[in-house]
Amino acid sequence: MDTPGSAEQMQDDEPKDIAERPQWDNQLQYVLTCIGFTVGLGSVWRFPYLCQTYGGGAFLIPYFIALVFEGLPLLHIELAIGQRLRMGSIGVWNSISPYMGGLGVASLAVSFLISLFYNMIIAWILWYLFHSFQSPLPWRDCPINLNHTGYVSECEKATAVNYFWYRETLNITPNIETSGSFQWWLVLCLATAWCLVYICFIRGIETIGKAIYVTVSFPYLVLTIFLIKSLTLPGATDGLIYLFTPDWETLKNPDVWLDASTQIFFSMCLGFGGLIAFSSYSVQKNNCERDALIVGFMNTFTSIYASIPIFAILGFKANENFNKCRNWNILRLTNSFNIGNENITLENYDDWFNHFNHTDPSEVKSLNLKTCNLQTFLDESASGTGLAFIVFTEAVIHMPGSQVWAVLFFIMLFSLGLSSMFGNLEGILTPLLDLNIIPAWIPKEVLTGLICLTSFTVALIFTLGSGNYWLGIFNNYVGSMPLLIIAFFEIISVVYIYGINRFNDDIEWMTGKRPNIYWQATWRFISPLMLLVVCVAYVVVTAEKRPTYNAWNPDYVNFPLADVQPYPEWVYAICVLLSVLPIVSIPLVAFYRFMGFFKKYIMDRNNPNPYQKE
């Protein structure tokens, strides 16, 4: 099969169109763009949620293991191979082996599908950002009912924050089978989000490079401000203790290891094709190993750095709810036992409760006092979007100058999302251009506009009443198994098809030194083996249980608790399709190439001398 030659030979034979490929203005611009791509919304939402779900510090153990033995090795490969071959994902894997051409198509498909729901989240951020300028914040109080006799019943049961998210923003349906109508305000926000992405991306790296300085640096400024402010909140210490206190029993749960691996690949955007595209615009004489370590470190650092203010705020919120619960009990005890006001305080509540429970237990039991446990309130978390649109918005209304904090927070989220969208679109645009299937008379600006318009049209499904359910499906099934499979075949392609020795020669030519024993061991044995084990385990664990989803159903008997429902058969089929569709190109392209080779082989056997006249 055709494979690239040595580094020196490839440099001499480099095609003119590759030699004239656009380049970054400077190395800082390139590294910042990679950091902006990998440090996205998942660092602020998914990582803190997983830490909380799996026992705080205990989750960091499988996370760092996955980082060292899976994430960093593949990150180095993607940056190095894109920089050396100077092509997008399709061109890179097709050059390594025509049989692996489907890998690039798979990466393109993943980038496209993830871009669909990722920009919907940015649309939600814009919706909240627009409303953050109101005073008071619209999610602070429940709206009055139509009869003006009280508050809306659904809001009274669920709290104003939940009502604003589920009813005012999403206008969500009670289940996924009830589609509902398009919500015009979400359609407008989605259109605005795609217009902003298009404006910033209109000329590829030429405009990305200018915008990236702001979209990457601003979130760190805001996170630092939030870090300082959050640490001054009452109860912040409880949240941090909860974050860094490990629950070692969770390490026995296989789900924690699977989620750690998928979080590494999702947060570092491995398998998307965007990193390969970005590195293809870098100069070839560049230390890609250093770049991989910087980007990997910044991704992990940001995830932990963002978790500190998030958990401090969660601790503050838990203490607020804990004290509210105890104040309710104090009022009941004060009225029942005819005690003077302010005799029972939060500080001596436990002493008074134990006294009454010892002297008159039947009376205390009849009061139906609430069970107030700080740990229980700390355990109450929201995953994904809920962390920003429910947990934080509830906490911010208790902060002085709440509008300022809300505006800063949602601008930060917008910056994180926008910089990641650059990489997602680059993972689509660059392979298409490298394939030379786009007519030369179509300007890049028009092609970019068509991609954005197509994505906007397909993403309208997320603006339906059931759109939040569909977004959860895309997030769970596109951003997990396909990335693991793509990563596995990427390592196999470079190490065992392209050739590890040739790859080492390329890196030595680009960086001036050969990869050390760590890279050799992980590339050759450890990473492929771990990825294979994780892929098999993921399939087994997923197949053992029928997937369910949390529905917002006001008619549910235990509302406002989530109504956990199984997916209907047709929806479950779509879930499987979304897991298979992005990667089906890998075997299909390999089979197509093999059939072409087999056909040529048969023709050569039947006509060994094509120049001989009959």
Image: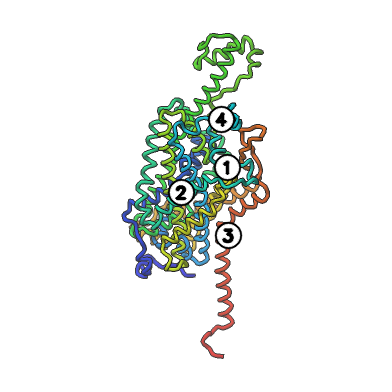
Left or right, 162 with reference to 307: right
Q: Amino acid at mark 2?
A: Thr
Classify mark 4: residues with Cα within 10 Å, few (<14), some (14-19) or many (20+). few
Disc 4 to disc 2: CB gap under 8 Å = no
Query: If you read the primary sequence from the N terminus, does the residue marked by circle 2 or circle 1 appear first?
Result: 2
Count of numbered marks? 4
The amino acid type of the residue labelled 4 equals: Ile
Query: Which residue of the protein is positioned furthest toward the bottom in this rendering?
Result: 614
**Residue occupying image coordinates x 66% and y 35%:** 555
The residue pinned by badge 1 equals 255
**Element assignment for label 3:** loop
- In front: mark 2 or mark 1? 2
Cβ–Cβ under 8 Å for marks 3 and 2? no
Q: Is residue 190 visible?
A: yes
Amino acid identity at mark 3: Val
* First reached walking from the N terminus: tag 3 or tag 1: 1
Residue located at (66% from left, 13% from top) = 362
Residue 575 location (% of width, % of height):
61, 51
Residue 541 location (% of width, % of height): 62, 46
Q: Of discs 3 and 2, which sits in the foreground? A: 2
Residue underneath mark 4: 144
Q: What is the C-alpha distance between the residues marked 3 and 1?
A: 25 Å
From this viewpoint, which residue is outermost toward the front? 147
Q: Which residue is mark 3?
A: 584
The local secondary structure at tag 2 comes to: helix
Question: Picture coordinates of residue 363 (x, y %)?
Answer: 65, 12
Task: Provide the secondary structure element on which disc 1 rests.
Answer: helix
**Numbered circle sitting on residue 376:** none
Q: CA distance from mark 4 to mark 2?
A: 31 Å
Number of residues whose C-alpha sits closer than 10 Å to that of mark 1, classed few (under 14), some (14–19) or many (20 or more): some
